[in-house]
Image: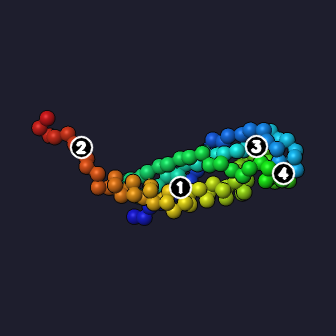
């Protein structure tokens, strides 16, 4: 089987911020926790991290959506998180962990104990 990857995002860190036009906003998403799970059959490996998003000073008021008003991740944020999840080195580390699990020693209880 080939290793399959699943990226999810949950918790967010918000703060007040100043946008590119100097306007002040609240509920600006600074970072999101991304979870990346790799699975190959019965074996899986997992990693997570806070992923920092765009600096508020680069975001225009037209592009800003307060966290409290969101029903789903905006495409711009989703794209940034996908870049984190698609990182080849990160995925290879998870695949290497799975490969190690496949050949790891297994403790068993003997039938004569």
Between disc 4 and disc 1, the foreground one is 4
**Residue 44 image offset from top left, x and y in percent:** 42, 52
Residue pointed to by mark 2: 107
Alpha carbons under labels 2 and 1: distance apart: 30 Å
Residue 62 shown left or right of residue 13 in the figure: right
Dot 4: element = loop
Alpha carbons under labels 4 and 2: distance apart: 58 Å
For marks 3 and 1, the one nearer the N-term is 1
Q: Quadrant of the C terminus?
A: top left
Q: Residue furthest top?
A: 113
Q: Residue at x 79, y 50 (%)?
A: 57
Q: Quadrant of the N terminus?
A: bottom left
Q: Residue at x 65, y 48 (%)?
A: 52
For marks 4 and 2, the one nearer the N-term is 4
Kindly indicate the quadrant of the structure image that contains residue 96.
bottom left
**Residue 95 image offset from top left, x and y in percent:** 42, 58
Disc marking residue 20: 4
Residue 11 shown left or right of residue 5 in the figure: right
Alpha carbons under labels 3 and 1: distance apart: 26 Å
Q: Residue at x 79, y 53 (%)?
A: 58
Pointer 4 with pointer 1, Cβ within 8 A = no
Between disc 3 and disc 2, the foreground one is 3
- Crowdedness of circle 1 by 10 Å Cα count: few (<14), some, many (20+)? few
Dot 3: element = strand
Residue pointed to by mark 1: 6
Q: Residue at x 49, y 52 (%)?
A: 37
């Amino acid at each position: 089987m080939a290793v399959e990857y699943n990226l999810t995002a949950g918790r967010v860190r918000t703060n007040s911020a100043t946008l590119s036009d100097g306007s002040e906003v609240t509920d600006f998403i600074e970072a999101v926790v991304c979870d990346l799970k790799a699975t190959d059959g019965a074996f899986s490996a997992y990693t997570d991290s806070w992923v920092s998003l765009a600096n508020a000073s680069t975001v225009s008021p037209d592009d800003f959506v307060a966290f409290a008003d969101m029903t789903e991740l905006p495409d711009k944020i989703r794209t940034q998180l996908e870049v984190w999840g698609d990182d080849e080195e990160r995925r290879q580390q998870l695949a290497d962990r799975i490969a190690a699990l496949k050949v790891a020693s297994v403790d068993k209880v003997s039938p004569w104990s």
